[in-house]
Amino acid sequence: MFDIQSFYEAKSVEDAIRALSQDEKAQVISGGTDVLIRVREGKDAGCSLVSIQKIPELKGVELTDSGDIKIGAATAFSHITNDPLIQKYLPMLGEAADTVGGPQIRNVATIGGNICNGATSADSASTMWTLDAELVLEGPEGERIVPISQFYTGPGRTVRDRREICKYFLIRKENFEGWHGVYKKYGKRRAMEIATLGCAVRVKLSEDKTRIEDGRLGYGVAGPTPLRCRKAEAVLKGSRVGDMEAVERFVETALTEVNPRSSWRASKEFRIQLIGELARRALKEAVERGGGIMNA
Amino acid sequence: MGVVGKEMQRVDAWGKVTGEAKYSADLEPRDIYHGKVVHSTIANGLVKSFDLEEALKVPGVIKIVTCFDVPDCQFPTAGHPWSVEEKHQDICDRKILNQRVRIYGDDIAAVIATDEVAAARAARLVKAEYEEYEPIVTVEAAMREGATPLHPDIRKDNVIVHSHMTMGPSDFTFEEGLRQAKEQYGEENLVLVEADYDTPRISHCHLELPVSWAYVDVNGKVTITSSTQIPHIVRRCTAQALGIDIGKIRIIKPYIGGGFGNKQDVLYEPLNAFLTMAVGGHPVRLEISREETICSTRTRHAILGRCKGAATKDGKLLARKLDAYANNGGYASHGHAICANCGNVFKDLYQDELGCEVDCSTVYTSSPTAGAMRAYGIPQADWFAECLTDDLAEKIGMDPCDFRLKNCMGEGFVDPANGIAFHSYGLKQCIERGRERICWDEKRKAYANQTGPVRRGVGMAIFCYKTGVYPISLETASVRMVLNQDGSLQLCMGATEIGQGADTVFSQMAAEATGLTFDRVYVVSTQDTDTTPFDTGAYASRQTYVSGMACKKCGQVLRERILEYAAYMLNYAETDLAKTIHGGTVRQAAGRMREALGLSAEDQITAEMLDIVENQVVVTGGAPKLFDVAVVAETSVYSLDRSQHITAEVTNHCKDNTFASGCCFVDVEVDMPLGLVHVKKIINVHDSGILINPKLAEGQVEGGMSMGLGYGLSEEMLVDEKTGRVLNDNLLDYKIPTAMDVPDLDVEFIQLEDPTGPYGNKSLGEPPAIPVAPAIRNAILHATGVHMNVTPMTAQRLTAAFKAQSLI
C-alpha cells in the first residue's frame, strides 16, 4: 500500500497542466517506477499525483513529414525497443532502452520519465544527447522546445517547471541519417541494474568507410548530469578509421571533459577506468556498425 | 529401495506454482491491525525519551509502545536447542524493544494502527531523544583498548568469546611448528605463505520477508503464525522474552518463502506477541520490509582470516595458522558458534603434518547483527583455507589439484576434538570427477603464459561439512503417523519445509518405511506447536538425516502395528470378523496363506510372517498377496470387537554425525580492463551419500551455487564506518545475481551409502554454497596471476588490483 494523498488521471495534456496548476504539491506520474519508489521510501509520502499515463497523444513513435522522428514522452521502454521506426532508424536508442531494469520495469517506465527525473544514470539520456534530441514541453504559458543540452541544470534538476508536461522528443533527420552508434551500459550485474557508467558513441563515416566524418560521445554518470564530450568529438572528426593514435587521443580528451565522483557505489578511479575503456569499445563497435574496419 | 532415490515430483509443486499454497500473510483474519517498528537513527547510545504527540494524531493509530513499556526480560534469539547446561546456553542480550541502542536501526518502539499506511506515517513521526555514543562499527574499533562495551552486563569488553583450538599436539603453535619444520626439512626446502583473507557481511535475501501475525486465542494462548524455520524454538524464545510459560505460546508455521538461516533466528515474533497483548489480544500483523530485513534482522558474519601456512617444496603441507575475527554486530544471536565452526573446518580440511593452530574471536560491534546463514561460518572457513591452499601451491610451483589430493583430509578422518568422522568418504572421488569434467589438466596447460587484456583460467576449491550439530549440541526429532481408513496416512513432522523439499523427501521415506505408495502419504506441511511433534527445525543440513531417521523409525513402527492388526484379522477371520464386509476377503486370504505356508487351522499367524508391499499386505517374501492395507485400516477403526486406531509416534535422539564433502571447479574468462569475470563453466561435485530425490538434490545444489557466485563476485553489505548505517539496504544496491548473471550450472554426485543416515544419506542443504567463491578466486589467480584476497571480487577491486600489477 502506498501513502498517496490524491491521484488524478488526466484526460489530456491541458487537463494535466490544469490539475498541476491547481495543486501546488501535485507532481506528474506516468509509469511510476521512480515516483513510487520515492513514495515508498517516505520521501514523497502523502503526495498528490497527476497521472499522464492514459493520454494517447503522449505515446508512440512517428516519422514526421520532414523525416524527423517524434517519440511520445509516455512511450514505455519496451515499446520503444520494439517499435519498427526505432529499429529502422535509431536501433541504438532501442538497445539503450532495453538495458533499463528488468522486463516488468521496461513495460511501464517511460522515456519521458527517464529524462525528466534528471538522473545522470538515465540509460536513454546519453544516447539522446548524442542525437541532439529536443524536448517539447507544454505548460500554463504554452509550448516550448528545449534542446537536451540545455535541459539539465544539476543532479536531479532540470529546466522543466513542475506544471510542465514533456510531450515528446524530436530527433532531427540530420542527427540519425547516415549515423551509426552504440550504447554501452556498465552495471555491476547484467540486469536489474542502475548504470555505474553509460557511454554512447555515434559516428558518421565517409562513403568509402575509411574516415570518421563526424562523431559524438555522450556519457551518463561521468558527471552530475548526462553530458557530451565535444572536444573529444572534435579529435575524432576527420580521423582515419583504424587510426589507433586518434582513438587514444579521443579517449584522453574525453577524460579531460568528464567529472565523475567517488561514492559508495563506485570510486572515481573506477569510473575513470570505465570512461576510457567503454569509449574505446563503443567507438570500435560503432565504426563496425557503420561498415568500417577498426583494426585495418 | 523403492521410492527413495526416485525423482518424485514435489508434493507442493502444484500449490506453489499456481499460487494456491498459503503463506503466513495469506492466512490473516479480517480487520487485523498493522504493526510498524520504529528503528533508531543512531548506532550507539541510549533512548532518553520519546515525543509521541504528532504520531498519535495520525488517523488510524491505535497504540504506540516503546522500549519503556516492554517486559524487563532479556532473551536469546539463536535457533539452537536450549541447553540445560548453563554455560552452553545462548546469550540473553536483548529485550523486545531496546532502550540501549546498539545498532543503527535498533528496535526502539512500535506503532499499531488500523492500516499499514497509518502505521508507517506514525512511525515516521515518532521522535526519540538520545544520548549518543560513538559508533564502534569495526572489529578493530570494538577491540581497541578503552572501547565502550556494548553489553557491560554480559561481557566486560566487546569480545563475546575467544577460543583457541589445535590439530596435532594440544599445545601446538604455528611458531613451534615452523621451528620443527626448519629442523626437520631445512629452511631452504620450505615455503611459507602469510596473508589476510577477508569476507563480507551479506544478507540472506530470502524471497518472503519476515512476516507474522498474532492474536490471543480464547484459551488465553498467544498464537503466532510466522514465516520461520524453527517453530518450536520461536515458541521457547517468545516465552522467555515475555516472561511467561511456554505452554501459553503457540506457533504456527505455514509454507515459507525461504529463510537461508535468517529465519533460524527468532526475529520479530516476540514483538508481535507483545503487540497483540498490548491491544487486548486483537490480531496484529507485523511485516518487516526488505530494507528493515537487510539492516535489522541478521546477516552472514564478515570474518577476517589472518592466515599462515608452511609446506615443503615437494608439496607436503606442514603447518597452518588461522586468526579469525568475526564481526557479530550489536547482538550475540548465534554468538560464537559460527566462528568456532569456521575454525573447525579450517583445521579439518587438510592434514598438516605438524599441526594447525586456530584462534577465533567473535566481537560485538555497533553494526548489523550477524547470525546463521547457509553453511554457518564455513563459506568463510573455505575462503581462508582454499585461498591459502592455492597460494601455497603456487609458491611451490605445484598443480593445486595435485597439492590438494596429496594433503586433503583422507578416508577415515576423525576430528579428534569432537569425534565427527566420515562414515562414507567420497572427497577424492569428487575431486577426480571434477578434474575430469572441467578438463583441468588440458586447461591448466592451455591457459599458461597468456598475454592480452582478456585471459582464461581454471580454479577449484574443496570443502567438508558435517551433518547436523551432534555432539556440539542436541539432535532430536519426533514424527507422528496416523493411518486413515482408506489405507493412506498423515505424516506429521516437527521438521519444517522451507522450500528445500523436506516435505517431499519425508513423504518418500514414509512410503519406503511403511510399504505404502507415495500417493498415499499426506504430509502435514504446517507445523503447529500445539499439535505437531517436537523438532528443532530446518538448519545445519540436519533434517533429512536426523528427522529422516525419525521418519524411518516411525514408519517401521506403523508398519509393525498394521501387520500386527492384519495378523489378528487373519487369525480371527472365521469368528470375530465373519460378519464384517471384509470378512470374505480376509477368510480367503487366510486360506491362501495357510496353504502357501503349510499352516494348519490351529497355527497362529504372526506379524513376522507378513509384510507390506505397495499397499498390499503380503506374506513375507512378496507372495501370496493377501489384501490391501485399506482392509486393515478400515477394520481397525470400526471393528466392534477390537477397535484400535493405528498411529505411531517416535522420537529419534540422534547421536551420530558424518562428514559430507565435495568440490567446485570453474573455468573463467577475465576481461581485465573492465574487471569482468565471465564464468564459462562451473561444476560442483558432491559427496552427500545416497540421494533421496536426485532432482531436488540437484535443485539444492544449483541454488547454493548461485549464492556462491554472489558471494564471490557481487554481494556485500556496505556499512558506513562513521554512522553504522547500511548504505545499500535494498535489492537494487545490494547485488544478488540475476538470472542473466548465473551461467549454466553443472552438478554431479558421487553416491556412496553412509551407514549412519536413514537411507545412506548425509548433509546437502548448505554445502553447495561453500566452495564456489574460492574456486572463482583461484581461477582468476590462474588467469592473471593476481591474488584476490578479499571477496566479493567486484570489478572495482579487480581493476584496482590489475592496475597495481600493471596488467592494465
Image (spheres, grey):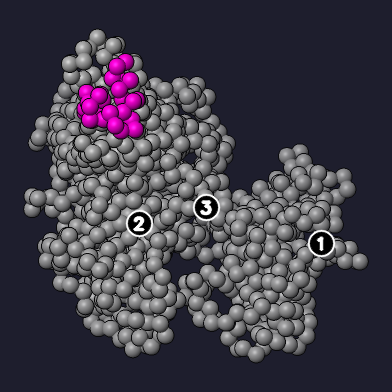
Q: Nearer the viewer, residue B254 or A157?
A: B254
At numbered mark 1, what does the secondary structure look like: helix, strand or loop?
helix
Rounded to the nearest angstrom, the CA distance separating label 1 from label 2 is 56 Å
* Left or right of residue A9: residue B634: left
Q: Position of residue A12 (x, y in %)?
A: 75, 79
Up-down relation of residue B486 to residue A124 (above or below)? above
Is there any visible trace of residue B365 in the rendered image?
no
Exactly how many numbered labels are in the figure? 3
Residue A115: image quadrant is bottom right
In front: mark 1 or mark 2?
A: 2
In front: mark 3 or mark 1?
A: 3
At numbered mark 3, what does the secondary structure look like: helix, strand or loop?
loop
Return the chain for callout 3. A
Where is mark 2, residue-wise?
B227
Label ID, residue A188 = 3
Label ID, residue A175 = 1
Return the chain for callout 2. B
